[in-house]
Every structure is written in C-alpha cells, then in structure tokens.
Amino acid sequence: MRHHTRGSKLGRKTGQRTALLRSLARSLVIHEGIVTTYAKAKALRPFVERLVTVSKMGTLASRRTIATRMGGAYDVVKKLHETIAPRYMKRAGGYTRVIRLGKIGKQATESARIEFVQ
C-alpha cells in the first residue's frame, strides 16, 4: 500500500529529481509559462506554489530560503520578489495552472503547459 507517499519520483533518484524541479521552476519563473510532460507539471506545481507563498512575505529570510531551494539562482529570487509575489498578495493560493495539451507529435507521453494565473 502506498499510504503517506507524497509526490512522484519521475523515474529518477533524489538528486536528479531535485535538479529537475529546480530547473523547471527556474524556467517557469523566468518565462512565466513552459511546456513539459503532464507528470512533471503535476510534480512542479506544489514546488512553485510554495516558492511564491514564501516570497509573498518579502523578508530577507524568505529571499534566502528561496535562494537555497533554487540552488542559488538569484535572478529567480529577484523576479519572484519584485514581479510575481506582488501580483498575488491578495490571493490565498492557486498561483499556477496546468493545461493538458495531449500528445504532441510522436511523443508517447502527454504534454502539458504550466503557467502562472493572471
């Protein structure tokens, strides 16, 4: 039984999965919308939602927390605090949406677009 298991392993070891989520999160914050597989989009969503929630605090500690979780990507920290977090100050959650695109081309997996809600 799979009680109390959270998230998907995405067929990767822990370090590889962490690096993948950091990379996807960085791309999402910079471009504010990316196309990836549906499984990766579902795994990325809670990771990014927590980053936005922490960045809404606007403190130095929150900047350092995000920098740690993003592996020192300070351009992402700056954009989260200065442009994305102020946009969602009155919103209590649900900052991203996942849109299924179906299978694109000859891919075997379903693609999805993850983007920030306006």
Image (cartoon, rainbow, N blue to C red):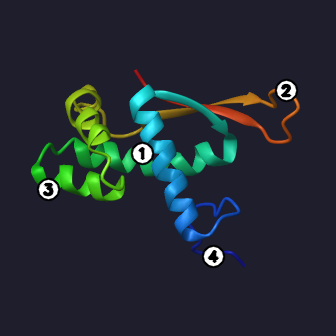
**Mark 3 to mark 4: distance in Å?**
34 Å
Q: Are marks 2 and 4 in contact (CB under 8 Å)?
A: no
The residue that label 4 is drawn on is: 3
Q: Please name the amino acid that badge 2 sits on.
A: Gly
Return the residue found at the far left.
Answer: 60
Q: Please name the amino acid that badge 3 sits on.
A: Ala
The residue that label 3 is drawn on is: 61
Q: Please name the amino acid that badge 4 sits on.
A: His
Q: Please name the amino acid that badge 1 sits on.
A: Val
The residue that label 1 is drawn on is: 48
Q: Are marks 2 and 1 in contact (CB under 8 Å)?
A: no
Return the residue found at the far top.
Answer: 118
Task: Identify the residue at image location x=35%, y=56%.
Answer: 71
Front label number (2 vs 4): 2
How many residues crowd mark 2 within 10 Å: few (<14), some (14–19), many (20+)? few
Number of the label disc, if any, that sits on residue 105: 2
Mark earlier in primary sequence (3, 4): 4
Mark earlier in primary sequence (4, 1): 4
**Mark 2 to mark 4: distance in Å?**
36 Å
Q: Position of residue 20 (x, y in %)?
A: 55, 53
Q: Position of residue 97 (x, y in %)?
A: 52, 32
Front label number (3 vs 2): 2
Front label number (2 vs 1): 2
Q: Is label 1 in a helix, a strand or a loop?
A: helix
**Mark 3 to mark 2: distance in Å?**
44 Å
